[in-house]
Image (cartoon, rainbow, N blue to C red):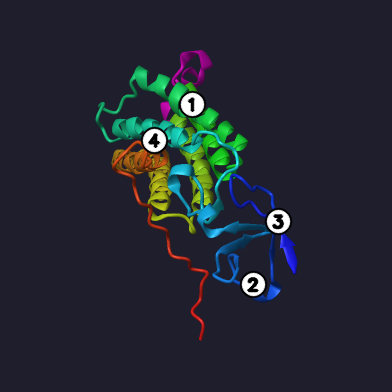
Amino acid sequence: MASINSTVSNDSYSKPIPIHDEELKIHKTCSIAGPGNEFVIIGDNKYYRHELMQAFGGTFTSGLTPYPKRQIANAPALGLFATHMNIFVLGLIFAGATGGSIPNAAVGLFIFVGGLLQFLAGVWCMVGGNTLGATAFTSYGAFWLSFGAIFIPGFGIGAAYADDPEQLNQGIGLISVGWAIFTTMLLACLFKSTLSFFWTVLTLDLTIILLAAGFLSGSPKVMKAGGIMGVINAFAGWFETYAGIATKQNSYLVPKEIPLPDLSRKSKK
């Protein structure tokens, strides 16, 4: 008889649940045990099936994940709102809704909502043990802070390129290439997530790629395409935000996530 540490319920955390080796069914992604296959074993921990939650974009989780032990608020919902509010405004700007200029009010949004608020959401994800959320939100929060700084005269960035504004566009384009690579890396971690979650990060990646190409090429059409994709991404991100805050207790409309197919499973001959 083997004993594996278990997180089974609010009343019995850390109680070991014995299992019989002959009951164990080995799978590539996890192990299933119990007479009725009611246990799921992930690593050295054993859980009841009902204590595992599927990948869920509203909490920035990918794949089967145990319910968190810490009773804290859903910080990823805040981070998703913050970044996609900025992307919505920036998308409208590049799509031509403001004639191509960045309003001063948007700069404050970049700094305090997409930057500070999202960075704090990432820190709260660290406290909650959400590595993916912490990495994404603190990184993108820092991006929005640095992007907003470009348009604040006190930083002197715009003045440094006053004689050659095209060089500023080239610089932003190169920076955007780096962020596109980073976003693609995050996207690769979501193949076991949900359809809407994957779509949100995919459209974000496409937005950054198009804007990077637009800044580097100087093509207004490519920039406009990037802006339109940004608006599409904003609505995808807001869906995930709503999914993260809507519950059966506060809403009659609770989104149902569609998990992506498990490509690691192969049919047995």
Q: Are marks 1 and 3 in contact (CB under 8 Å)?
A: no
Q: Residue 117: which numbered mark, if any?
A: 1
Identify the residue under disc 2: 24
Marks 3 and 4 close (CB-CB < 8 Å): no
Dot 2 or dot 4: first in sequence order is 2
Q: Which residue is mark 4?
A: 84
Please say whether residue 177 is visible from this viewpoint: yes
Q: Quadrant of the N terminus?
A: bottom right
Viewer-closest of 82 and 26 = 26
What residue lies at 33% left-to-right and 30% top-to-bottom?
89
Q: Earlier in the sequence, mark 3 or mark 4?
A: 3
Say which of marks 2 and 3 sits in front: 3
Q: Which residues are magenta?
A: 150-166
User: Which amino acid type is shown beneath numbered disc 3?
Assistant: Pro
Secondary element under disc 1, as helix, strand or loop, is helix
How far is mark 3 from mark 4, CA to CA? 43 Å
**Would residue 155 be found to the left or right of residue 126 on screen?**
left
Sequence order check: which comes first, mark 2 or mark 3? Answer: 3
Q: CA distance from mark 4 to mark 1?
A: 12 Å
Say what amino acid the circle numbered 2 marks.
Leu
Q: Nearer the viewer, mark 3 or mark 4?
A: 3
Residue 11 horizontal/vertical position (percent): 61, 45
Q: In the orientation shown, which residue stands out farthest toward the front?
A: 11
Residue 115 lies within the magenta run: no
The residue under label 3 is 16
Q: Residue at x 40, y 23 (%)?
A: 109
**Residue drawn at point x = 42 percent, y = 49 percent:** 197
Question: Furthest residue to the top?
Answer: 154
The answer to whether residue 164 is visible is no
Report the Cα–Cα distance between label 2 and label 1. 46 Å
Q: What residue is at 55 percent from the left and 69 percent from the top?
A: 37
Nearer to us of marks 2 and 1 is: 2
